[in-house]
Amino acid sequence: MATNFLLLVKAAIDEAKGLTSGENEQRLKLNILQCKCIVEKLSTQTQEILNSVESTCADSAVPFEPYEATFKELYRVVTDALSLIKDCCAEKWLLTAIKQRAGTNIEDFAKILYEIEWCNLILCSINPRKLSSVGRQTVMFEPEGCNGKLNAFDLFKLERASNEDRESLRLGLEHLRQDHVCDNTMEVCLRFRSDACLATQLLEMLDKWAAALADGPMATEIAVPSLWKVDPRDLHKGKSLGKGAFGKVQETTWLGEKYAKKVFPKNGNESQSLMIESDILTRICHPNVVRIVCWSEDKDKDNCSLVMDLMVSDLSKFLKDVPTPRLSILPAVGLMLQVAEGMKYLHGRGPRGFIHRDLKSLNILVRPLADAPELKYHEGYLNAKVADFGTAKIKDLSTRYSTQTLDVGTRLWMAPEMIGNEDDIDHESEHDSLRKLPFKVDVYSFAIVCAEILTGDKPYAGSNMSLTKLLKQIREHGLRPKLPESCPWRLAFLIQRCWEGTPDERPNFSEICRELRYIKGLLLRGNLC
Ligand SMILES: [Zn+2]
């Protein structure tokens, strides 16, 4: 029997309501008001729409069928919301606050609220077949509703909630701090992080964050404390996760949770720049970007470690393992949207934005969705994160010792204007469009990844041309991967624009995200062919 996602959604909404009201309310320790914003939206608007859909369908004896895909999508969003709320109920709230970057993570809540609203919009816009009187006005589903921005009213409420949550957190932290004064030359601070010490540093982070906001959202160059710099002895060694493609990677445990640790050697004199850059990386925080949770420097071994999200596979391997010939179109577009959202975030971060320059399926990591076993991993319901981005120094350090810099694979994802200019990419490039439009190289690579997702194959898999010949064809004759016949025209058109030979004809990631979300919505509504 098919899974009834409507029932699952309703049960999940009830669970979320239960967690934030009555006796359970006491267990909510962090971001209380922001959690309540989410639950309020679900239990009023969404619940109302679901009831109306149910009664309309029952009255006119029409099946739920046109709504089912959207119920499934809504279930994904509600389980995301539930995970976040459960996290905020954790007994050890101080550790959760550190891991969540609580006080500064309003975007986690804004994203969920936006997605709830987006699903609501789709449900309201569906006009079930054979149904003449819907009992409410038909809502239009248009690209503007797909821009990823939360409406002004909800945003205002959320911002107010976030400010109050931050003040509560501050009070809690001040209580814990008592009169601790941090001194990172002392063993007590460096090695034995007491709650008082952690609270002191978290407070310092909140202050710096507020100061940075006052300077404008782009100010990320402030050096923040050593909260995310941890003693190497605190990163417990776990099993090896591999060598080569990612450098040397091991499993590790930090604050009771499992992460991946990438270790690379450094030169003694690089400490200062390493600290500044690691610090910038630890503040990169988006659901579709691999998160650097903390870092450490081992002066004895002269190496440096970045500690990041533990994922189960990479996109390349995942696509190879998909049991059916390829993913179906809806999860495929969902996957593209996740990658695009991660890239949009990276391009907008910092004073100049991060350009990836090496986006490919091997650098996109995946893992099953948390708490939603009904959404099957092998059908493409997964969490995807862009990995292996970085600042110049960290990239340089971590690839200097890795075997796969600019190997065969990498060049097939590379924008034509970059082919032959590889050595120039981090310097003042001779190439005009590389200098003027450096972000567009990632858009090109993204399109190649989309083709991989649709075909399930490496780019140009069927070709028997030599690499040199392939690259010449790509650069001089506009050769591109072949998209499957079944690809909807609107999607094919978008991908083709992204891999245009002329960089300024490629859209940016804001536009790509909006269009992909619109396409995803049309697919959910069942009217895209
Ligand atoms: Zn301390």
Image (cartoon, rainbow, N blue to C red):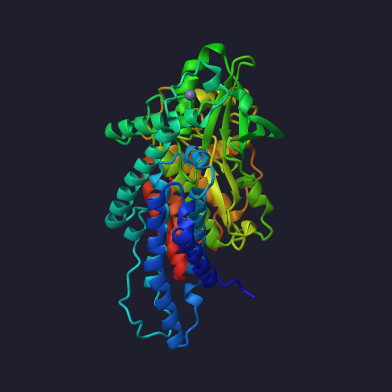
Is 225 above or below relative to 291?
A: above
Q: Position of residue 110 (x, y in %)?
A: 38, 51
Kindly give the residue lying farthest to the top in the view shown: 269
Is 314 above or below relative to 194?
A: below
Q: Nearer the viewer, residue 143 or 57?
A: 57
Q: Position of residue 471 (x, y in %)?
A: 56, 37
- Number of labels in the image equals 0
- Tell me if residue 478 can be seen: no
Is 105 above or below relative to 112?
A: above
Which quadrant holds the N terminus?
bottom right
Q: Residue at x 60, y 49 (%)?
A: 367
Q: Nearer the viewer, residue 311 or 460?
A: 311
Q: Residue at x 50, y 67 (%)?
A: 9
Kindly give the residue lying farthest to the right in the view shown: 239
Q: Position of residue 218 (x, y in %)?
A: 33, 34
Task: Decide if residue 151 is on the left or right side of residue 185.
Answer: left
Is 14 above or below relative to 384?
A: below
Q: Nearer the viewer, residue 515 or 21?
A: 21
Q: Residue at x 31, y 56 (%)?
A: 154
Kindly give the residue lying farthest to the bottom in the view shown: 60
Q: Position of residue 214 (x, y in %)?
A: 27, 33
Picture quadrant of residue 296: top right
- Tell me if residue 497 can be seen: yes
